[in-house]
Image: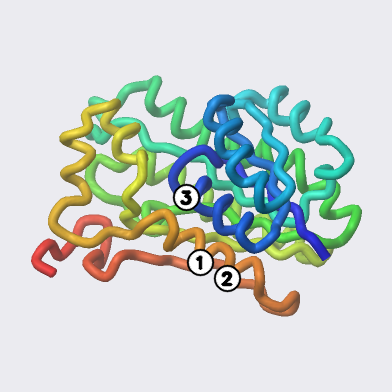
Amino acid sequence: MEKIALITGATSGIGRATAVHFAAQGIALVLCGRRQERLNALGQQLGKQTRVHTLAFDVRDREAVLTAIGTLPEPFAQIDILVNNAGNAHGLDPIDQGSLDDWDAMLDINVKGLLYVSKAVIPQMIERKSGHIINIGSTAGKEVYPKGNVYCASKHAVDAINQGMRLDLNAHGIRVGAVNPGLVETEFSNVRFKGDDQRADSVYKGFDPLRPEDIADIIYFVVTRPYHVNIADLVVMPTAQASSTMVNKTL
């Protein structure tokens, strides 16, 4: 039976790689992102392999989220898999020098955005007593590193929400789990350093980081386990990484 997956942050990085991997396996897709032109291009590409519907909205906009997901056309309305992937980091400053705008962006996208999308999708899962939610966290949700303050706090919140969500939805037979990557080479650092490509590129120099496709493969593994198996919390790092502050650049 065909499943339908809704993926946020689908136009780049882990979200895009997950969409590509799912499409290759015949999973129908609801692709969500802010950039309509990227959604159109990806939808056209993956539409050759599976059914695709795109939704352009910013997860920070509560009304836009609820309206877009609440008015999905019937062939895409029943979401079986929710991948809460949208998220970002802004700045890498000590707490006393942090930007209030950066703090708002991280908390609004990483925490509130995840909650808004989940709020829009969970009721139908409860009604059917079926569904699988994957929350994309981070190793930053398992530890705190210097100058990571608010970003780490936002990912610790994702970790807590994931645990609370699993408890609250247990009675309804809905599986909930988190995938928490370490260093993955995506646009993440370009956003964090506000377009400073040289600084962003230096993050991944000297070792072999994870690729978005690595995480996509893991997400697919998680959602294709037998129903009685729920991978509740998974941490994955490149071999060279031992923690957020320890990376072996001699390998």
- The quadrant of the rendering that contains the N terminus is bottom right
Q: Amino acid at mark 1?
A: Ile
Task: List x then y, in percent, for residue 33.
Answer: 58, 33
Q: Residue at x 31, y 55 (%)?
A: 183
Is residue 173 left or right of 20 when viewed as pictured?
right
Task: List x then y, in percent, for residue 187.
Answer: 36, 39
Which numbered disc, 3 or 2, marks the residue that appears first in the sequence? 3
Q: Which of the colour schemes (rainbow, by chain, secondary structure, one colour) is used?
A: rainbow
Q: Which mark is residue 218?
A: 1
Q: Amino acid at mark 3?
A: Ile
In the image shown, does 96 or 137 lie closer to the viewer?
A: 137
Q: CA distance from mark 2 to mark 1?
A: 5 Å
- The single residue placed furthest to the front in the displayed view is 48
Asked if 33 appears above or below 64 in the picture, the reply is below
Q: Quadrant of residue 55?
A: top right
Mark 2 in CB contact with mark 1 (< 8 angstroms) = yes
Which numbered disc, 3 or 1, marks the residue that appears first in the sequence? 3
Task: List x then y, in percent, for residue 61.
Answer: 63, 24
Mark 2 falls on what kind of element?
Answer: helix
Disc 1 crowd rating (10 Å Cα; few below 14, some 14-19, many 20+) is some
Q: Which residue is mark 3?
A: 14
Asked if 125 appears above or below 239 in the picture, the reply is above
Q: Quadrant of residue 214?
A: bottom left
Q: Which residue is mark 2?
A: 221
Q: Residue at x 58, y 25 (%)?
A: 36
Q: CA distance from mark 3 to mark 2?
A: 14 Å
Is residue 212 left or right of 227 when viewed as pictured?
left
Q: Amino acid at mark 2?
A: Phe
Asked if 172 appears above or below 69 in the picture, the reply is below
- The quadrant of the rendering that contains the C terminus is bottom left
Q: CA distance from mark 3 to mark 1?
A: 11 Å
